[in-house]
């Protein structure tokens, strides 16, 4: 992880396509609410799917607490939709096929040279 990405720092305001193919900026998805941002490996990873299943159960608490959720991985549009629908998530999933976040944050998963995914990270972002 880049040295400047730490507690209290601003995360870059990435703009990526969502599960409908529309480009979305993180700041617009967050609005004035806290946000849980999950960066993952992708649909092929059983650990990611397990975490997302647990987040689906937790998401109703986020809804009443006015907390937004966003998931990003390196899958394509079809796979990100398969993952989102398969776990029953209702929040936005963004896809980063060009690996902009992976390269910018320096989070290449070094153990998987076939899929070249991100090392999973979960951020809790303050409003603003």
Image: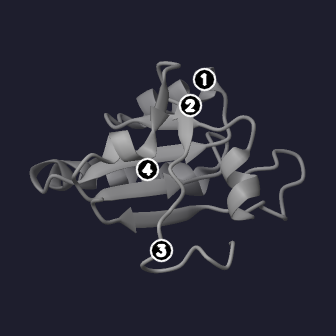
Residue shown at 60%/23% (left/top)?
A: 77
Real-space CA distance between mark 1 and mark 4, rounded to the nearest whole angstrom: 18 Å
Residue 95 position, x and y percent, is: 59, 35
Out of 103 and 118, give the one closest to the viewer.
Answer: 103
Q: Secondary structure at mark 2?
A: helix
Residue 119 position, x and y percent, is: 68, 62
Residue 4 position, x and y percent, is: 62, 76
Quadrant of image for the C terminus? bottom left
Task: State yes or no: discs 1 and 4 in contact (Cβ < 8 Å).
Answer: no
Quadrant of image for the N terminus? bottom right
Q: Nearer the viewer, mark 1 or mark 3?
A: 3
Real-space CA distance between mark 2 and mark 4, rounded to the nearest whole angstrom: 12 Å
Looking at the image, can residue 47 be seen? yes
Mark 2 lies on residue = 80
Task: State yes or no: discs 1 and 2 in contact (Cβ < 8 Å).
Answer: yes
Mark 3 lies on residue = 9
Q: Secondary structure at mark 4?
A: helix
For label 4, count other residues whose C-alpha is less than 10 Å away and answer few (under 14), some (14-19) or many (20+): many
For label 2, count other residues whose C-alpha is less than 10 Å away and answer few (under 14), some (14-19) or many (20+): many
Q: Nearer the viewer, mark 2 or mark 4?
A: 2
């Amino acid at each position: 992880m880049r040295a400047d990405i730490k507690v209290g720092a601003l995360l870059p305001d990435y703009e990526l396509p969502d599960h409908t193919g529309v480009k979305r900026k993180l700041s617009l998805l967050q609005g004035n609410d806290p946000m849980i941002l999950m960066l993952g490996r992708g649909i092929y990873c059983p650990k990611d799917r397990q975490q997302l299943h647990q987040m689906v159960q937790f998401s109703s608490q986020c809804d009443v607490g006015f907390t937004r959720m966003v998931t990003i991985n390196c899958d394509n549009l079809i796979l990100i939709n398969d993952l989102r629908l398969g776990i029953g998530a209702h929040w936005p999933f963004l896809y980063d096929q060009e690996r902009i976040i992976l390269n910018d944050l320096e989070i290449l998963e070094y153990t998987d040279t076939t899929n070249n995914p991100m090392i999973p990270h979960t951020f809790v972002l303050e409003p603003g």
